[in-house]
Image (cartoon, helix red, strand yellow):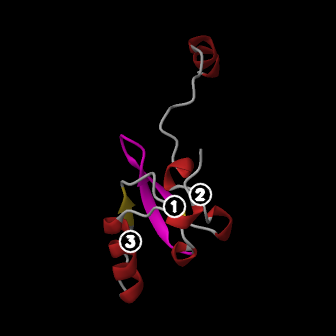
Amino acid sequence: MPRSAWKGPFVDFGLLRSIIKKQQSPKDKSLIKVYSRRSMILPEFVGLEVEIHNGKSFQKVLLKEEMIGHSFGEFAPTRKIFVPKDKKKNKK
């Protein structure tokens, strides 16, 4: 069941604070690290490059207009793609 419309989109406060800080100082070249995979992507985030934590490492993602309304977690998969061992042997 989706979140109620009257509540608005969920964005973690720490993430929102770091993105506002990043927008105020555009000279800073460091990427924003996102641990809150459940936070929604807002229109203000478009054009930023962030690193989304997948449980083990970070994956770089450029936020585009099509991503608005989706959560950060949708763009950093947490599981590896399964490849059977016999196919691995044939590739060598």
Residue extending furthest toward the right: 66
Asked if residue 8 can be seen in this view, the reply is no
Q: Is residue 3 above or below residue 31?
A: above
**Which residues lie in the magenta part?**
47-61
Q: Name the amino acid type tagged 3.
A: Leu
Residue 50, percent across and down? Answer: 45, 64
Q: Which mark is first along the chain, 1 or 3? A: 3
Q: Is residue 39 above or below residue 54?
A: below
Residue nearest the observer in this picture, 11 or 15: 11
Mark 3 Cα-neighbour bin, 10 Å: few <14, some 14–19, many ≥20? some
Residue nearest the observer in this picture, 77 or 60: 77
Residue denoted by label 2: 70
Spatial CA distance of label 2 from label 1 is 6 Å
Spatial CA distance of label 3 from label 2 is 15 Å
Q: Name the amino acid type tagged 1.
A: Met
Residue 44, percent across and down? Answer: 53, 78
Q: Which mark is first along the chain, 1 or 2? A: 1
Secondary structure state at the residue bearing disc 1: loop
Residue extending furthest toward the top: 86
Task: Please name the residue shown 36% across and 61% down the image.
Answer: 33
Q: What secondary structure do most residues of the magenta stretch adopt?
A: strand
Residue 88 sits in which quadrant? top right
Tag 2–tag 1 contact (CB < 8 Å):
yes
Task: Please name the residue shown 51% across and 61% down the image.
Answer: 40
Residue denoted by label 1: 40
Residue denoted by label 3: 16
Spatial CA distance of label 3 from label 1 is 10 Å
Q: Which mark is first along the chain, 2 or 3? A: 3
Residue 5, percent across and down? Answer: 59, 62
Q: Is residue 1 magenta?
A: no
